[in-house]
Structures are given as structure tokens and as C-alpha cells.
Amino acid sequence: MSVDESNKYSIEFYPPRTAEGETKLDAVHEKLAQLNPDFFSVTYGAGGSTKQGTQQIVLRYSARGSNVAPHLSFGGTDDEEVRTLLAAYKEAGINRLVALRGDLPSGAASHHRFASELVNFIRQETGDHFHIDVACYPESHPDSTSYDADVEFFKLKVDAGANSAITQYFYNSDAYFRFVDYCQGKGIDVPIVPGIMPITNYENLSRFSQNCGAEIPRWLRNRLEGFGDKKEDLREFGIEVVTALCDNLLDGGAPGLHFYSMNLAGSVTRIWNNLALSER
Ligand code: FAD
């Protein structure tokens, strides 16, 4: 299956846990849909959100005319649950998925299946129907034993049939460019799209980064800490820093950008417009 070159700029949501959150997300989706992203993606079981929530949001925004890619993982459940979801998505005209191992809910014992096994399973069940994205880590996945092993396991996902990849977020573009070179050297030839995390709240960003192994460079951490309670100033600074990062990535040949919106429209819209992505 060839990769659709037009699929360059995408925006990620997570399924809200409350009715109020859903109403807010509907408004955010409506605003962000005006930017005409190539697709939205919706996380699966991340941050304690329900799996049913993913399917509902995917089908709702798809019915409103957006291209939507559900995230999917085995996540400790049986094959049948994944098979049922694949059939429902196919039936609804969904043709793109983000396949992940997923993170376990706290208290769960162990992971029983890696993302490469899920990619294999999707290909076995549905052939070439879905364009499959997988995750990769320019600064290495926190569980990985070495940089090289992490890239080898990324390659397993591509060899199993992934069409493209989205990275964990980072604020150091050298980490991305070096990673892409290294992957290409290992024979990984799919587009590797940088995942972009807008900076809107320092405490949350710091916590996420700790958990997922993304580095906030010391200079940036110091600047962000310096804003204290001036949240609006921090957001403005974040927009400036992340716009420059994206510009640098695109100038250096990144094949697109995937925005982790955190269900907020403001910073994504500003960065998108600063970069004129709708025309780029
Ligand atoms: P894998 O590719 O399976 O890798 C996981 C770890 O195992 C890595 O350290 C890898 O090096 C190692 N490994 C892989 N294969 C093997 C093997 N055969 N033998 C030994 N070790 C191996 N989480 C969610 O819960 N829901 C989401 O919707 C979600 N969306 C995400 C979207 C993106 C773009 C990204 C970057 C992450 C997302 N995550 C999500 C987080 C992700 O699930 C976690 O980072 C998870 O810990 C790893 O998922 P993976 O698919 O990269 O796993």
C-alpha cells in the first residue's frame, strides 16, 4: 500500500470522560476542522479514558465529515474485541488506524503483546484496508534497553506492515533528525512524522514528560518555570518556541506534523496559522 502523500498535518484528541468534556470537545473539533487537517486521531485507553469513548468520538466526527484515525491496542483484552472494532471501523468507512501497545492501567500486571503483534494482527484480519501508523521515539522509549534495540523494535512494526510513524514529542529537533537518519540507515523507509506538543501548562507538561521519557531541555525548563502564575505569557512563549521548532522541522524535511492538542484549540490554531499549514 503506498502512503498518501497528502496526509501531512494531523491533530490528536483524547476521548473526554464527562458529558461536559464532550460538549467542549465538540466545539474544539468544530474550530480545528476549519484548519482542514488531513486527519484527526483519537487515543485509546490513554490517561484512563474509556475504550468505548474512542469509538463514539471517531464515529461522531467521521459522520461530521472529518477523516478520523482511531488509536487501537490489544491492551490486555482478547482478539475478539479488536476484531469487532476493526469490523465496525471498516463498516463506517474509516481507513486509517494508529496501532500501539498502549500503556497499562495502574495495577495491571504486565504487557502481553507488543505493537508489532497488533500490526500483524490487523494485516491478517483486514489486509490492506487500513493505512497503519505506529509510534516511535526519537529520544528512546522509557522501557527500552538501548537506542539500537528501540529502533530494531520500531523496524519490526514497519516490517509487519506499518505505513508511517508518528513520534513521541520532543523539543530538540536534532534528536528527530538524527533519529530519522539512524532509522533510514537501518532500512526503515516509512515517513516519520514529528509529534508536536504545544506548551500550555508547565506542571502538566513536566509530569507527562517525566512519564513518557520526553526531554524538556534545561534552558526551556528554566524559562517556563520563570513564568510562575503568568499562564497567558507562558502560552505566548510556548507558541513562539513550538512554531520555531515546527518551522525548523519542516525546513529540514519532516514529512508533516502531528499535534497533540490535549483537546484545546487555541495554541494549535495559532501555531498552524503562524506556519500557514493550510497552504503549505
Ligand atoms: P511497542 O512498539 O510495543 O514498544 C514498547 C516497548 O517495548 C519499547 O520499549 C520497545 O523498545 C519494546 N519492544 C517492542 N517490541 C519488543 C520485543 N519484541 N521484545 C522486547 N521488547 C520490545 N498510549 C495509549 O494508551 N493510548 C493511545 O492512544 C496512545 N497513543 C499514542 C500515540 C503516539 C503517536 C505515541 C508516540 C504514543 C501513544 N501512546 C498511547 C503511548 C504508547 O502506548 C506508549 O508509549 C507505550 O508504552 C508504547 O507503545 P508502542 O506502541 O510504542 O509499543
Image (cartoon, rainbow, N blue to C red):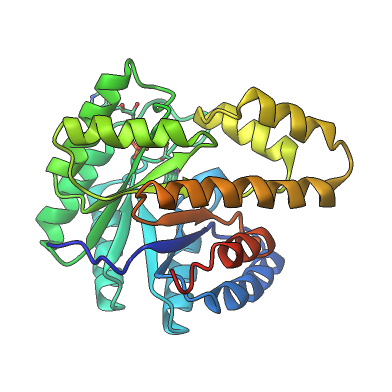
Q: Nearer the viewer, residue 133 or 125?
A: 133
Where residue 147 sits in the image (x, y, percent)? 32, 20
Tell me the quarter of the image containing the C terminus.
Answer: bottom left
Residue at the limit of the structure toward the bottom, as seen here: 64
Which image quadrant is residue 184 in? top left
Where residue 30 sits in the image (x, y, percent)? 59, 78
Residue 196 appears in the figure: no
Residue at the limit of the structure toward the right, as seen here: 229
Residue at the limit of the structure toward the front, as seen here: 251
Q: Tell me if 126 is positioned left or right of 231 in this view.
A: left
Q: Nearer the viewer, residue 272 or 130?
A: 272
Name the residue located 58 percent from the left edge and 48 percent from the top edge: 244
Name the residue located 49 percent from the left edge and 69 percent from the top edge: 57
Tell me the quarter of the image containing the N terminus.
Answer: bottom left
Where residue 35 sits in the image (x, y, percent)? 53, 74
Badge count: 0
Name above or below for residue 118 compared with residue 262: above
Name the residue located 44 percent from the left edge and 47 percent from the top edge: 249
Q: Tell me if 12 is positioned left or right of 132 in this view.
A: right
Where residue 107 sits in the image (x, y, percent)? 51, 28
Residue 275 appears in the figure: yes
Name above or below for residue 90 compared with residue 135: below
Q: Nearer the viewer, residue 45 or 216?
A: 216
Quadrant of the picture in which ligand 1 is shown:
top left
Residue at the limit of the structure toward the top, as seen here: 145
